[in-house]
Amino acid sequence: MKYDKIDSKLFIKNRKNFASAMKPNSLAIFNSNDIYPISADSTMPFEQHRDIFYLSGVDQEESVLMLFPDCPNPDLREVLFVRETNDHIAVWEGEKLTKEAAFLTSGIKNVFWLQELEKVLFEMTTYADTFYINTNEHYRAAVVTETREDRFTKWLLAKYPAHAVAKSSPIMHRLRSVKDQIELDLMQHACDITEKGFRRILNFVKPNVWEYEIEAELLHEFVRNRSKGFAYTPIIASGNNANVLHYIENNQQCKAGDLILFDIAAEYANYKSDLSRTIPVSGRFSDRQKAVYNAVNTVKKEATNMLVPGTIWKEYHLEVGKIMTSELLNLGLLDKADVQNEDANWPAYKKYFMHGTSHHIGLDTHDYGLLHEPMQANMVFTVEPGIYIPKEGFGIRLEDDVVIQEKGTPFNLMQNIPIEADEIEDLMN
């Protein structure tokens, strides 16, 4: 891994928190992800399942974690299985975790080779009444692939049909949505790498540069700072491309007078950052572009101040909609009749700002969190309003990542990344 070693006390604490929420006499099981094939002998780069990483720090394939806090055999209360390594594997695939390295990474003393899983599991099942299975219940999930976790669950329940079943997902959503200080430090590091990339492209962008050339500059800066690269597929959208919310082609030339909307960010140690900025190709905003830009920035600032403990996500978005409506009226994009006659299910402002303002962020870009429950201190949210005007040939989105504080306004992990229109112009010139 490119990142520095993470203190195992984070994973020890995470397991303790999960165990404290389990039913009596229950066993929870977490699997690593598959390495997904492409064609022939080609595969996708491995990405660890965030849940097993969160609970163990193990960042390699073919790993299984089992938690059984009430097990009468104390050696089986925390068990980690990893693929047995040898010299041949080391030569062909690189170093894998030894039992000692797995312990140092996770803080779990009882580490077995994967081929021992069925034997050890059998003993654990004789003591357990309930299995916690790990299903993907994220509100944005649309999974059509059968995962390693799915296959294991199918096998487990067929082999041991008499056990009760419970879900890990609600526990994981609560735990992962509230960050430990170690996690916040890792996210800050990801944001700091993102800052370096953004400052680099401010000196690189000029008329006739290609979107993919900008993408290459960003990737270079991210990787040289020990990131795997982009936290998600990057959006580098010049001109009217910005009005396609998930534009990822990045294959157009940037023309003088146009704006470029960036939705780009680095990951670090599997933790994500999420940045949006909009800059002028020629280094100066037109008066109209700057007016819209400043309106988006105003909405962003006011929305940020609303992210405090006790806020309900759905109600928050209703209030942000009111602020955006006011700004769109000031810009002449809406008139009073538009607002008076609007459909409550699709308010007038949605014509120009059709997506949400904030989502959880952490190990996933759209991270775990129970949106019907009040916000808490140490949750991390994006704030990302935008105004999109196809008829005028540009769209603007601004986004930072903020940590909810016990008292006062949120802490902006991206506070050092330029955002004011005048500062952007000064840096580009």
Image: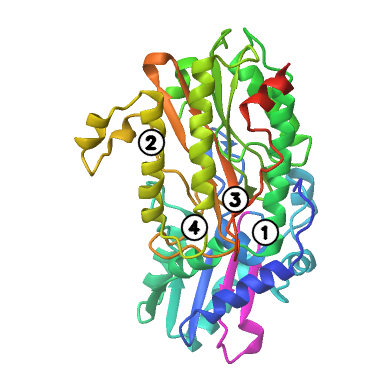
Question: Secondary structure beneath disc 4?
Answer: loop
Q: Disc 4 or 3, which lies upstream in sequence?
A: 4
Question: Secondary structure beneath disc 2?
Answer: helix
Q: Disc 3 or 1, which lies upstream in sequence?
A: 1
Task: Report whether 233 appears left or right of 86.
Answer: left
Residue 65: where, in percent of width, then height?
Answer: 59, 69
| Residue 91 lies in the magenta stretch | no
Which is more foreground, mark 3 or mark 2? 2
* Residue 141 visible: no
Q: Pointers 1 and 4 in contact (CB under 8 A)?
A: no
- Res 326 label: 2
Q: Amino acid at mark 2?
A: Ser
Q: Amino acid at mark 3?
A: Val
* Residue 338 visible: yes
- Res 368 label: 4
Q: Residues within 10 Å of mark 3 (few under 14, many from 20)?
A: many
Residue indicated by mark 3: 402
